Amino acid sequence: MFSIVEKSRIGHFWLYACKAAILHILKASDQILRFTLKELRSEWRQRYTINGILLQVFASVMIVYLAVRMLGDPAWNAIFWIILLFLSINAIAKSFIGDSRGKNLYYHALMKPVNLMLARIIYNSLLNILLALVSLGFYSLLMGNPVAFQGYYLLLTILGSIGFAATFTLLSALASKGGSSNLLMPVLSLPIIIPLLLILIKACKRAMDGIDPEQLLSDMLVLFLLDAMVIGLAYMLFPSVWKD
């Protein structure tokens, strides 16, 4: 049995460990929040990326509308996700590839690699969700909206947008360390994006058809776990990539 002194030491140790963990989390959260806000302010001032992507949204949906006035439910759903996939690639794929060496050194001195990756994922997720909602609204306006469960479809769209953002952010970081980053991006993305895209299309088709909500909840759980898996991979892999 532990003596009173040993119990007191153990209690002080756990109290110190909890305080250190809380301070570490608060410091990391502060770095992530500051970097995310900096990226949002920078994008709001320049607006080059978001204006170009919004132009692509309107152009893509307009081309579909002019080419095919009427779409069946499966085609409506599949074309929407194909449009959103390419929008995500253009909006997010250059997250790390576009950074100069000087900027990387500055970030390296400013914050921890894990915090940088999480901040980039959060920023890209917010950007991608905005683009997805604008795309869905404009697409529904021109092509009609045959979705039975609007709320479920919207939640699936948000989960899919986060999955695309996390995946392309991680792959951009990995590809930026390679010699031919423009070639590495599509090669690295295929094994992750194709399963995610197939699950999204099938789940959203169920939401369109008004199938049992319990099945849709299980689909959402699968998507949530996929998103969490990609973010976990980014959390583990990026520090070693950043050192190179």
Image: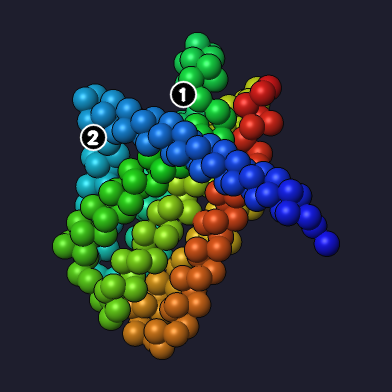
* Label 2 Cα crowd, 10 Å radius (few <14 / some 14-19 / many 20+): few
On-image quarter of the C terminus: top right
* Label 1 Cα crowd, 10 Å radius (few <14 / some 14-19 / many 20+): few
Q: Residue at x 28, y 26 (%)?
A: 42
Asked whether, in this view, residue 9 is left or right of residue 49, the answer is: right
Where does label 2 land, which residue?
Answer: 51
Where does label 1 land, which residue?
Answer: 98
User: What's the amino acid at mark 1?
Assistant: Gly
Instruction: Please state the horizontal and vertical placement of residue 104, each as a whole percent of the image.
Output: 52, 18
Asked whether, in this view, residue 74 is left or right of residue 223, the answer is: left
Residue 82 appears in the figure: no
What element does badge 2 sit on?
A: helix
Query: Considering only order in the chain, which callout, 2 or 1, is on the residue closer to the N terminus?
Result: 2
On-image quarter of the N terminus: bottom right
Instruction: Please state the horizontal and vertical placement of residue 8, each as a whole percent of the image.
Output: 68, 49
Asked whether, in this view, residue 3 is left or right of residue 169, the answer is: right
